Image (cartoon, grey):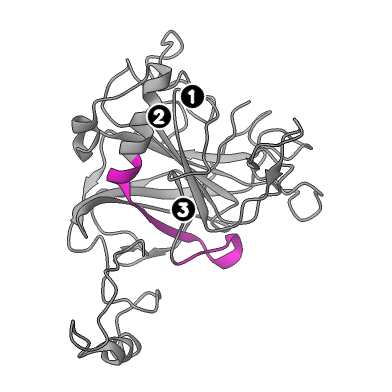
Amino acid sequence: MKKYIVCLMGLVMALGFVGMSSAAIVTDPAGDKVVGSKGTGPTDITAIQAEQLAPVAGIDVLKVSYTATPNIGGVMIFEADVDSSTGTGGNLSMTGIPVPPAPVKTTAGIDVQIIALNRDQSAAGNLGICTGSLTGTAVQRARKYGEYFVVTGGSGTSDTTGALRGYSDPTVITTAGTVRSITFPWATLLVYVNNEAEYYGERFDYYNAIDPATTKWQLSVWTDPNYNTDPVKDDFGDGQTYFNISDVAPNGNGNLVPSVDAGTNLTFCEGNFDFDLDVDGNDASKFKTDFGRSGLKNPCPQANYFY
């Protein structure tokens, strides 16, 4: 079976959703969680947004944000048809829902999936990393909260232990709140995923893929309601109830958000050095600590958002 994930958030304020700029926020109806044999998770997505900014430190970056209730959930999955082509990508989304025109379409066109963890996933779970074995028995290791990995949609499962894997900064855990924003090195991820997709005959058009106007996408959150009592910590499929998908947006029927927003000066808040919701004296104090460093005295590292 495929091994995948997703996440959530949910705080509304007078000027919009915290952590999300005021551009094209896609709201999701309250109480429309996935139900039935697959929909067991308690998380309810209330809004989603994806923004692409180029270039940041010389590379296109993707900021994915969402709000949910009662918290951000166990796992978030961002899925994208990056070249608006039905000829590339996997047959299904990670939610098991074909994209339109369902049900006759056999190639959904989902090219890229990003799986981000909001809490630990055990080695025995569906998201455990296979690290190989000298004895012929598969060896897996646990994944930790804050970790993300990226796979190509046409491959089913994939090698996610190399350059397609990373950690979010700051690292946020499930119970920390109802809002989540994660930034990914999008251009780099697309290069590696496209190279991997070539082996499955699913290589996409990179020049279209890097254009936010041609990237269709959706977001889902997966949460095991029995996580605290289940000996196998697995928010994707916990052994007690196989699928723990809680909610998918924009609407869960296979229709995707038609494009990614082009980033603006509100996409990031570079002066927010302590990762809270404001830029104030605490941030100024942190800035002043390093003020005056130069190439001649205490040079700064060549850091970017992913350093």
In primary-sequence order, the first of circles 1 and 3 is 1
Q: Decide if residue 294 is on the left or right side of residue 139.
A: left
Asked which secondary structure carries label 1, the reply is loop
Q: Which mark is residue 196?
A: 2
- Residue at 37 percent across and 14 percent down: it is 101
Residue 73 in magenta stretch? no
Q: Which mark is residue 165?
A: none
Amino acid type, mark 1: Ser
Q: Which residue shows up at 27% across the image and 59% down it? A: 21
Amino acid found under the numbered disc labelled 3: Gly
Amino acid type, residue under disc 2 in the picture: Glu
Give whichever of 79, 58 is nearer the camera. Answer: 58
Q: Disc 1 marks which residue?
A: 155
Q: Quadrant of residue 258?
A: top left
Going from the N terminus, do you reach mark 3 or mark 2 first?
A: 3
Looking at the rendering, the stretch of residues picked out in magenta corresponds to 170-189
The residue tagged 3 is 166
Residue 180 drawn at (x, y percent): 45, 59
Which residue is depicted at the point 44% across and 43% down?
164
Q: Is residue 278 left or right of residue 243?
A: left
Q: Are marks 3 and 2 in contact (CB under 8 Å)?
A: no
Question: Of circles 2 and 1, which is in front?
Answer: 2
Q: Nearer the viewer, residue 206 or 19?
A: 206
Identify the element where label 2 is drawn.
helix
Callout 3 crowding tier (Cα within 10 Å): few <14, some 14–19, many ≥20? some
User: Do the numbered discs 1 and 3 sit on residues whose CB atoms are within 8 Å?
Assistant: no
